[in-house]
Image: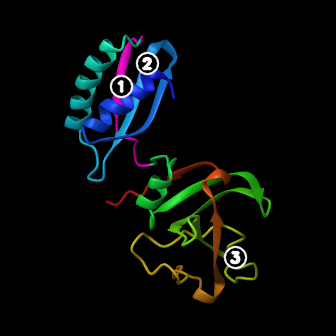
Amino acid sequence: MSAWQSAIESAVSAMGYEVVDVEMASGGVLRVFIDRPEGIRMEDCELVSRQLSHALAVDDVDYRRLEVSSPGLDRPLRKAEDFVRFAGSEVAVRLKRPFEGRRNFEGILEVEADGRFGLLLVEPAPDAPGGRGGRRVAPPRPGAARRRAPQVPGVGVAATVARRLVFALDEVDRAHLVPTVEF
């Protein structure tokens, strides 16, 4: 971690926020993504931006523009704490190496007893009637019964297969929350 990244991490953490990501983009744009369990409001971004402007000036960090924002609905998951915090949520995981010919998986995130993590994958059974043609069936919403395959309109429970993918963090290339928007 560079000196300016450490300065950002310590300043933001002291304010009670989590640094999700920091990037130095082209044109000298410094982007800082922050979060906290209650979520991020515009006022939080303004407060952190003011504080970071002062902290970065003291540390003589060279940037043209500072942008502070929430990580968004598709928040990346990087640390073990992120995976624990968002257990029960729908996530997308890209593995470093293929498993059963695939690297990309979506499912409900679970924490395993051995310190690893799992995804509850709900997929159509290979012999399922109804012409699903191998399309992925959406996993259950967070808070739903997590060990049962969900009811899929037009397809019976017997036509879906619930599988678990268990992985360690060092096997993950990248992971993020799957955006869920309810109106």
Above or below, 135 against 21 in this view is: below
Which quadrant does the C terminus fall into? bottom left
Residue at image point 29% right, 23% down: 52
How many numbered tags mark residues here? 3
First in sequence: mark 1 vs mark 3: 1
* 103 sits left or right of 54 in the view: right
The picture quadrant where one finds residue 155 is bottom right
Which circle's residue, 2 or 3, is located before the other in the chain?
A: 2
Of badges 2 and 3, nearer the viewer stands 2
Could you say which disc has been placed on residue 29 in the image? 2
Badge 2 or badge 1: first in the primary sequence: 2
Name the amino acid, label 3: Gly
Q: Secondary structure at mark 3?
A: loop
SS for callout 1: strand
Q: Which residue is mark 3?
A: 131
Q: Image point 75% across, 82% down: which residue?
A: 127
Q: Position of residue 93 (x, y in %)?
A: 60, 55
Query: Hey, what amino acid is under mark 2?
Result: Val
Residue shown at the point (42%, 77%) measured from the top left: 144
Tag 2 and tag 1, C-beta contact below 8 Å = yes
When the figure is inspected, residue 130 is found, relative to residue 8, above or below; the finding is: below
The residue labelled by disc 1 is 67
On screen, residue 53 above or below 180: above
Mark 3 residue crowding within 10 angstroms, few (<14) / some (14–19) / many (20+) = few
- Examine the structure image and report whether residue 54 is included in the region drawn in magenta: no
State which region is magenta. Answer: 62-73
